[in-house]
Image (cartoon, rainbow, N blue to C red):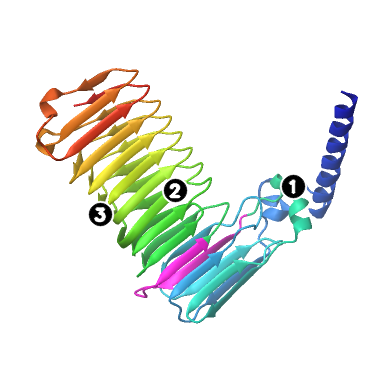
């Protein structure tokens, strides 16, 4: 016990020393709303850009609160940035590609940061000239969202970080949001497979069109409404959250939740539907006109499936299973 107390005491002392050093680096000022010294914008960038056809952007590791990034259509191609005193930005155009990254912060500086003292209002906005078509976008931001709107991209958009996108036309979208949400609305991805995932955030899709699609969240909800998915078997998954579907159109669909409910309004499905929950309920609407053969199995729950909906001779299969929960299909 004495040994543990000694180790604990040393840890507390070291933590206090790091706090004092970090505090000193902020001129011994406590945060007070906009008066936080690191919250102040100390330098800005506003520069028109030449022609470019792709974007490669990495603004990871810029502080405890991150640096929000907006990419949108504008009258001219332009970059605007608001930066706090600890942030520096490098940008250039090489071989038709716009490259943007934050300058690396030293390991010591990262170690001595005190999170609540490191808050900032920094941001980056990239304007893409109206009518200009990009070939691709690749972007990484580990702490805050990308906001993308009103763009035309021939091939793929690859996002490592949270993303909010609307009015996009691209070949596909691949997004791995980490702790943030994925929100996509009024967009079209009609050339390649799209893959949307999050570790600790929700995935929401509204009024989009996809060539093919998978969507998942480890610890969040998945909500999909008024989308059209043309090809392939779409896998929609949540490990610890609910899956809810409004009206959508699918080629084939597989739904799963390890610890949450699955609910769906009527889905227009060309080939097959499978829904499985380990610990939760399944509630859904199936029409007689779907002409589906229905299998259902609730191992430890009620199995309520309208028998009039089952077309036993059909080649279209709907399969519902729950290990610990009810199944209700009307």
Packing grade of label 1 (10 A; few <14, some 14-19, many >=20) is some
Question: Could you tell me if the residues under marks 1 and 2 are in contact, i.e. CB atoms within 8 Å?
Answer: no
Q: Earlier in the sequence, mark 1 or mark 2?
A: 1
Q: Give the range drawn in magenta.
A: 121-139
Mark 1 or mark 2, whichever is nearer to me: 2
Query: Dot 2: what SS?
Result: strand
Query: Dot 1: what SS?
Result: loop
Query: Dot 3: what SS?
Result: loop
Horizontally, residue 4 falls left or right of residue 263, namely right
Compared with 113, 16 (above or below) is above
Q: Where is residue 78 in the image (x, y as percent from the top left)?
A: 49, 74
Packing grade of label 2 (10 A; few <14, some 14-19, many >=20) is many
Q: Position of residue 24 (x, y in %)?
A: 84, 51
Q: State yes or no: residue 130 in magenta.
A: yes
Which residue, given by chain and number where applicable, does mark 2 sit on?
197
Q: Where is residue 171 in the image (x, y as percent from the top left)?
A: 34, 64
Which residue, given by chain and number where applicable, does mark 1 sit on?
114
Which residue, given by chain and number where applicable, does mark 3 sit on?
231
Question: Could you tell me if the residues under marks 3 and 1 are in contact, i.e. CB atoms within 8 Å?
Answer: no
The residues tagged by marks 1 and 2 sit, at their Cα atoms, a distance apart of: 30 Å
Question: Could you tell me if the residues under marks 2 and 3 are in contact, i.e. CB atoms within 8 Å?
Answer: no
Query: 38 and 330: which one is in front?
Result: 330
Q: Which of marks 3 and 1 is nearer the N terminus?
A: 1
Horizontally, residue 225 falls left or right of residue 49, namely left
């Amino acid at each position: 016990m004495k040994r543990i107390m000694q180790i604990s005491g040393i840890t507390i002392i070291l933590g206090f020393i790091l706090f004092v050093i970090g505090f000193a680096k902020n001129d011994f000022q406590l945060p007070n709303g906009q008066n936080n010294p690191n919250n102040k914008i100390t330098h800005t960038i506003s520069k028109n850009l030449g022609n470019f056809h792709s974007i490669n952007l990495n603004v990871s590791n810029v502080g405890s609160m991150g640096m929000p990034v907006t990419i949108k259509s504008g009258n001219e191609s332009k970059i605007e940035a608001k930066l706090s005193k600890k942030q520096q930005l490098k940008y250039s155009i090489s071989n038709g590609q716009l490259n943007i990254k934050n300058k690396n912060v030293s390991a010591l500086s990262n170690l001595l940061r005190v999170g609540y003292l490191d808050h900032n209002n920094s941001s980056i906005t990239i304007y893409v000239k109206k009518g200009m078509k990009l070939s691709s976008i690749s972007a990484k931001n580990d702490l805050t969202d990308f906001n993308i709107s009103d763009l035309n991209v021939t091939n793929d958009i690859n996002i490592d970080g949270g993303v909010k996108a609307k009015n996009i036309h691209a070949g596909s979208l691949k997004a791995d949001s980490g702790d943030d949400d994925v929100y996509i609305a009024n967009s079209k991805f009609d050339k390649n497979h799209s893959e949307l995932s999050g570790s600790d955030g929700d995935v929401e899709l509204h009024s989009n069109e996809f060539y093919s699609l998978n969507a998942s969240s480890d610890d969040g909800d998945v909500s999909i409404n008024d989308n059209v998915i043309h090809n392939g078997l779409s896998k929609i998954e949540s490990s610890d959250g609910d899956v809810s579907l409004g009206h959508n159109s699918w080629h084939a669909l597989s739904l799963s939740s390890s610890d949450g409910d699955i609910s769906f309004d009527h889905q227009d499905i060309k080939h097959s539907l499978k829904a499985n929950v380990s610990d939760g309920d399944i509630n859904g609407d199936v029409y007689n006109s779907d002409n589906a053969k229905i299998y259902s199995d609730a191992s430890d729950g009620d199995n309520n499936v309208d028998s009039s909906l089952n077309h036993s001779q059909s080649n279209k299969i709907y399969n519902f299973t729950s290990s610990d929960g009810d199944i209700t299909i009307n």
